[in-house]
Image (cartoon, grey):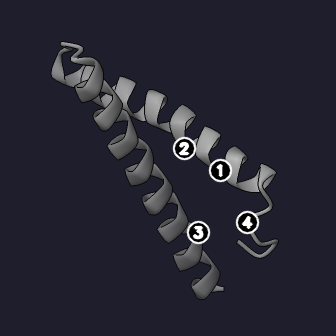
Amino acid sequence: MIKAVIYILLGVLITGSTSVALGKLLLARLQVRLYRGERWLFSFMLGSACFSGVLFALAALHLLNKGV
């Protein structure tokens, strides 16, 4: 039971940090000037969209396993 909770929390942490990192890269590339609170919010939202697109592309190319 506790092992499953650890895996869930680890998945949330990795997915969230990847989304924020992708969003920050995109905002830096676009040279958008935002306030600190807006930067975190838009980084997460834009990064989530990018991350979703990457995962969709990998799934469409059959590069994801069923267990992943």
Q: Is residue 8 rendered to the left or right of residue 44? A: right
Secondary structure of the residue carrying numbered label 1? helix
Q: Nearer the viewer, residue 29 or 6?
A: 29
| Residue at screen point 77% across, 55% down | 61
Secondary structure of the residue carrying numbered label 2? helix
Which quadrant of the figure contains the N terminus?
A: bottom right
**Contact between labelled residues 2 and 4, with CB atoms less than 8 Å apart:** no
Which quadrant of the figure contains the C terminus?
A: bottom right
| Residue at screen point 37% across, 34% down | 23
Distance CA(mark 4)–CA(mark 3): 19 Å
Numbered badge on residue 55: 1
Q: Is residue 68 rendered to the left or right of residue 40? A: right
From the viewer's perspective, is residue 22 above or below residue 26?
Answer: below
Place of residue 64 in the rendered image (x, y in percent of width and height, measured from the top left):
73, 66
| Residue at screen point 30% across, 36% down | 25
Q: Which residue is mark 2?
A: 51
Q: Which residue is mark 4?
A: 64
Place of residue 4 in the rendered image (x, y in percent of width and height, measured from the top left):
64, 80
Name the kind of residue labelled 2 in the image.
Phe
Distance CA(mark 1)–CA(mark 4): 8 Å
**Contact between labelled residues 3 and 4, with CB atoms less than 8 Å apart:** no
Q: Which residue is mark 3?
A: 8
**Contact between labelled residues 1 and 3, with CB atoms less than 8 Å apart:** no
Q: Nearer the viewer, residue 14 or 49?
A: 49
**Contact between labelled residues 4 and 1, with CB atoms less than 8 Å apart:** yes
